[in-house]
Image: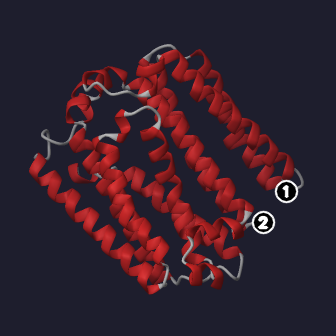
Amino acid sequence: MAILKLMRYKNLLMVLITMVLTKYAVVNIDAKNTNINNVEFILLCTSVLFLTAGGYIINDIFDIKTDAINKPHKMFIETFIPIKKAKIYYFLCTLIGFITGTYISILKSSYANGFIFFTTPILLYFYSKSFKKNTLIGNLTVAFLTALPIYLVYSFSTDYNEVVSTNNFLMIFKIATPQIFLYLFFAFTTTLIREIIKDIEDVNGDLAIKAKTIPIVVGRKRAANIALFCSGFLVFMLMIVLLRVRNQPFFLLYGIAFILAPLLYFTYHLWIATNKSDYSRLSKILKIIMLFGILSMLLFLIK
């Protein structure tokens, strides 16, 4: 059970749900988007999940000192799992993720996506080692990697000869549906907000390793204001989306009740937050909002 907690199995489950719903609830609505069969999709999910698990493990390996200050009750390495064994788990997860991702990329002649499976482990390693200590770079890296599974599912599922022939992953953004853009934006923005909040929550441990996170550089309050601005912008964009689907009652009611209202609640409490426990609670609330946002993909099945 310790290894599952080290791999953040709950977060991995959320990644899997995101990928499954992206393919079967959003992408496969369009008959053109059937370029990847179920077995190939399982390989894609396997790659993403193992690379993600490897990222969590290497992050904990580098975070032993800060976790001892910020969250000693949640430490697994050197408490339940020796660091040498953790490194073996990291190597195996990364290797499995890289091999399966490279295989599916070659199988589908999508070499640009194959490059993603090569660079992602490198990004995860250097994020854990140094990026997260630098102002905003670590936050943007995590936000980008969180949105990446949605892009990968859409990219591999979309049967467009232009994408396959050019191997140009940027081409996918010229043909992507508005729904994919919406979920990419939602995943990126909510993750960015949550990462800033987590930095505020973990500022004491980050100070111990001389990190230069946003709250350390500009102060907790200014960092909270940055997160507040991002949250307000997300509310604004969500309201525009809801106005566009006002004639679709399922989308409208779900969006108001399970995303907009909780997000407004979150934004208000972010505005009045003052201590570590407040930010810890906000991080959990935002995670629930993220889950509701992903589950909204189910509505495309009853559209």
Q: Quadrant of residue 190?
A: top right
Residue annotated with mark 2: 303
Colouring rule applied to residues: secondary structure
Give the number of the disc on residue 93: none
Image coordinates of residue 3 in percent, x first then y, are 22, 53
Q: Quadrant of residue 97?
A: bottom left
Q: Residues within 10 Å of mark 2 (few under 14, many from 20)?
A: few
Answer above or below: position of 130 versus 228: below
Image coordinates of residue 95 in percent, x first then y, are 26, 68
Image coordinates of residue 269 in percent, x first then y, are 60, 21
Residue annotated with mark 1: 248
Image coordinates of residue 231 in percent, x first then y, are 64, 33
Task: Specify the amino acid type for callout 2.
Answer: Lys
Q: Nearer the viewer, residue 300 or 50?
A: 50
Q: Residues within 10 Å of mark 1 (few under 14, many from 20)?
A: few
Q: Secondary structure at mark 2?
A: loop
Q: Secondary structure at mark 1?
A: loop
Mark 2 in CB contact with mark 1 (< 8 angstroms): yes
Specify whether 95 is left or right of 184. Answer: left
Q: Nearer the viewer, residue 193 or 144?
A: 144
Residue depicted at 61% across the width and 19% down the height: 271
Q: CA distance from mark 2 to mark 1?
A: 8 Å
Residue depicted at 26% across the width and 50% down the height: 57
Specify whether 55 is left or right of 64. Answer: right
Task: Specify the amino acid type for callout 1.
Answer: Gln
Residue depicted at 37% across the width and 53% down the height: 123
Answer above or below: position of 170 versus 122: below
